[in-house]
Image (tube, rainbow, N blue to C red):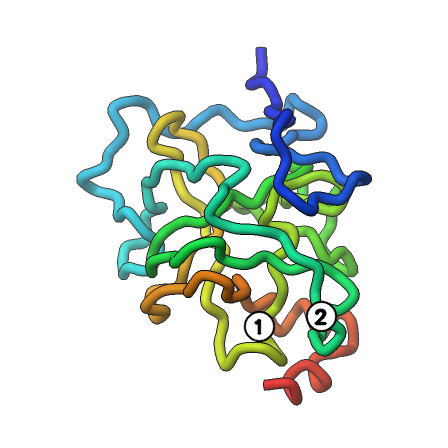
Amino acid sequence: MGKKIIKSTSIPQNWPSDITYLASNEFFPPSIKPPNPFSFPLPTSKHPNNPFTSSHLLPISTSPPMPNPSVKIKKLQDDHPAYPGYGLFANKDLKKCNIIVCYTGKVTKREIGGEEGNDYVLGFGGEFCIDGCKQGSEGRFINDYRGILQKPNCAFHEFIDSQTGEIKMGVWVCSGTEKIKKGQEIMVSYGKSFWNSRGLLRTKENFS
């Protein structure tokens, strides 16, 4: 029997009513969910505890609470490049190299889910993608840094859950960021391919 999908009865403040909150990924179809590649005890002595190292191995970390009270969803002001949408903000100081939230959604094969044109799809492993459009976590509200910050303060990186051995997608505070201060927006780089596929690369680079 596959792992039960966690659709949390507790949802973050300002969560849209038409989006399903997922504390864990939903695989579609369920049969594509791969077995956990690691058995216990996990090889913690070989793997780093964050993704910002020279190691080619996935980091091992405890998953953050979902929902996470350390972050909050807010409607954006009209001078924000992503207005009239939402953004994700720090509800407390967040230290560098720490994981903030897991990015969750519907996981499908890349050839089924696709990535081009969908603002909420992330590549996941070599053959999957996570679609957070209609279901997901706080991570779906993270905006691109262009037009707001000089550089992103967070990044998407896969990691191994130290409690389950499962591979997940995490949002991590960048190693070059001393900390994200309370009230500051959490921002990543969507990458040039994201903007290029939408014909917006030149415009967005002008924001920097």
Amino acid carrying mark 2 in the image: Gln
Please identify the quarter of the rendering in which residue 12 is found.
Answer: top right
Query: Is disc 1 in contact with disc 2, using a CB cutoff of under 8 Å?
Result: no
What is the crowding at mark 1: few (fewer than 14 residues within 10 Å), some, or many (at least 20)?
Answer: many
Q: Which mark is residue 47?
A: none
Tell me the residue that label 1 is attached to.
145
Left or right: 28 in relation to 49 = right
Please identify the quarter of the rendering in which residue 41 is found.
Answer: top left
Q: Residue furthest right?
A: 18
In percent of the image, x 60 and y 66: which residue is there?
A: 190
Of the pair 26 and 65, the residue shown nearer to us: 65
Q: State whether residue 131 is above or below residue 120.
A: above
Q: Residue furthest top?
A: 1
Please identify the quarter of the rendering in which residue 8 is found.
Answer: top right
Q: Is residue 34 visible?
A: yes
Residue 121's spot in the image, x, y percent? 68, 51
Residue depth check, mark 1 versus mark 2: number of the one nearer the observer: 2
Residue 154's spot in the image, x, y percent? 47, 62
Q: Is residue 111 visible?
A: no
Of the pair 208 and 39, the residue shown nearer to us: 208
> Helix or strand or loop: what does disc 1 sit on?
loop
Q: State whether residue 197 is above or below residue 126.
A: below
Left or right: 108 in relation to 91 = right
Upstream in sequence: badge 1 or badge 2? 2
Q: Which mark is residue 77?
A: 2
What is the crowding at mark 2: few (fewer than 14 residues within 10 Å), some, or many (at least 20)?
Answer: few
In percent of the image, x 62 and y 80: which residue is there?
A: 147
Q: CA distance from mark 1 to mark 2?
A: 15 Å
The C terminus - image quarter = bottom right
